[in-house]
Image (tube, rainbow, N blue to C red):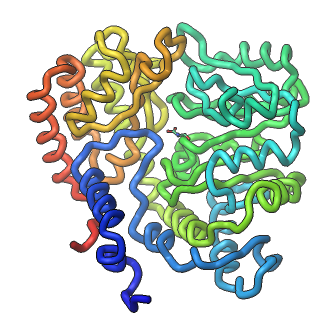
Amino acid sequence: MSSQAVGSLKALKAADPAVYAAIRKEEKRQRDKLLLIASENFASPAVLAAQGCLMTNKYAEGYPARRYYGGCQHVDTVETLAIERATQLFGAEHVNVQPHSGSQANMAAYFSVLKPGDVILGMDLAQGGHLTHGSKVSFSGQLFQSFFYGVDRQTEQIDYDAVQRIAEQCRPKMLVVGASAYARTLDFPRFQAIAKSVGAYMMVDMAHIAGLVAAGLHPNPVPYADFVTTTTHKTLRGPRGGVVMCKAEHAKAVDKAVFPGLQGGPLMHVIAAKAVAFGEALAPSFKAYQRQVQANARALASALLARGYQVVSGGTDTHLMLINLNNKNVTGKEAEVALDAAGIIVNKNAVPYDEKPPAIASGIRVGTPIVATRGMREAEMAEIVSLIDQIIQRHRDKPLQREIRKQAKALCNRFPFFYPYES
Ligand code: DSN
């Protein structure tokens, strides 16, 4: 075995040139392209160091001080730190930091109080919801009877009266709140009143907005919901993973659902990185960062509206927006491909009441977590909108795509990638 120090790619370069080369290409892609995927972010060097550390070698089934393996003193320390810091950030009565992903965090919340065949009511995937909120192609729609609410056709915002009516009709055991493509503030007290009126548990999946919640820039669902789940890698800017929080009365059931119900050994290196990320999110600089994420999103939306784009619901309160391209003679898929060729990375996305199939879609989703992490501000958002607009207007123009790619790279280079690997 090599005696090479860990923490850089040096150990990998000679051992596995193919994987090494792919990582270096990904480094270049992240450095040189304008990354506007709303669910992505750049984790800090400290988070990456923890995530790439030798705690990956340790089995630790169980929970701190209650493990099924010896030698867990130090992994207990990081898991306890992660739990304490997440508790400080969000104020939950109970926190479990072991879910490998957001999907598994959601599963744990469901399995702690639901039985197969129970009714759940969530936001429609086609209107901004998430696969795990009851979609038939996910476990959530296969194990449970799922019903959906959506947005009002005119306002393109959640129609809470309709949610109440649907809840009264389908009588869910769990009301699921949260979205992957919804740009407006969620009214948690209203959702809580709806859940209570039909005797349902309430779960909020705050994965997209967790960073804004941590910074106090979006209302916190924790006081209102029985369960709150999140991923740690979106606006929260940590490692890829999940967390499930709940009221004290559900603590035992949630812990049992995560382990041994759904998972075996926790990923202790990832939990170490979650602890680091929660520590970063408690620092005052994190609040300033989230303010910039939000200000950038507002600036992007305003600049798009000024150029005649249809921003779904007319704007954004968060880190993301949906752009309906129906008035621009281009599909979401065509826009995604043309923008990609121009060094601008977004994802195609269905818009509310979309008539196109999801693989084509009428819109794109745009988010600001990464560009804000790079240090870009409102002025740069105007530049980005100008680049996007040129491509959308002439989406088949290959020479234009090459030219914009250079401009996108130049803009990125003004805000350097902050953790290049040594060559
Ligand atoms: N796939 C994520 C997103 O892009 O929103 C949600 O899990």
Q: Judge from the rendering whether residue 116 lies leftward or rightward of residue 69; answer left or right.
A: right
Q: Residue 325: horizontal and vertical position, in percent?
A: 35, 15
**How many marks can you see?**
0
**Residue at horizontal 22 percent and vertical 34 percent from the top:** 341
Residue 230 in view in this figure: yes
**Quadrant holding the N terminus:** bottom left
Q: Residue 206: horizontal and vertical position, in percent?
A: 62, 42
Residue 192 in view in this figure: no
- Front-most of 226 and 405? 405
Q: Quadrant of residue 419?
A: bottom left
**Residue at horizontal 57 percent and vertical 66 percent from the top:** 270
Q: Judge from the rendering whether residue 66 lies leftward or rightward of residue 72; answer left or right.
A: right
Q: Residue 252: horizontal and vertical position, in percent?
A: 88, 59
**Residue at horizontal 12 percent and vertical 41 percent from the top:** 406
- Front-most of 204 and 2? 2
Q: In this view, does 219 lie above or below 74?
A: above
Q: Residue 229: horizontal and vertical position, in percent?
A: 68, 47
Q: Quadrant of residue 301?
A: top left
Q: Is residue 269 above or below residue 88?
A: below
**Residue at horizontal 73 percent and vertical 18 percent from the top:** 163
Q: Judge from the rendering whether residue 50 lies leftward or rightward of residue 17; answer left or right.
A: right
Q: Quadrant of residue 416?
A: bottom left
- Front-most of 85 and 338? 338
**Quadrant holding the C terminus:** bottom left
Q: Judge from the rendering whether residue 203 lies leftward or rightward of residue 3; answer left or right.
A: right
Q: Is residue 180 above or below residue 18?
A: above
Q: Which residue lies furthest to the bottom in this view?
A: 3
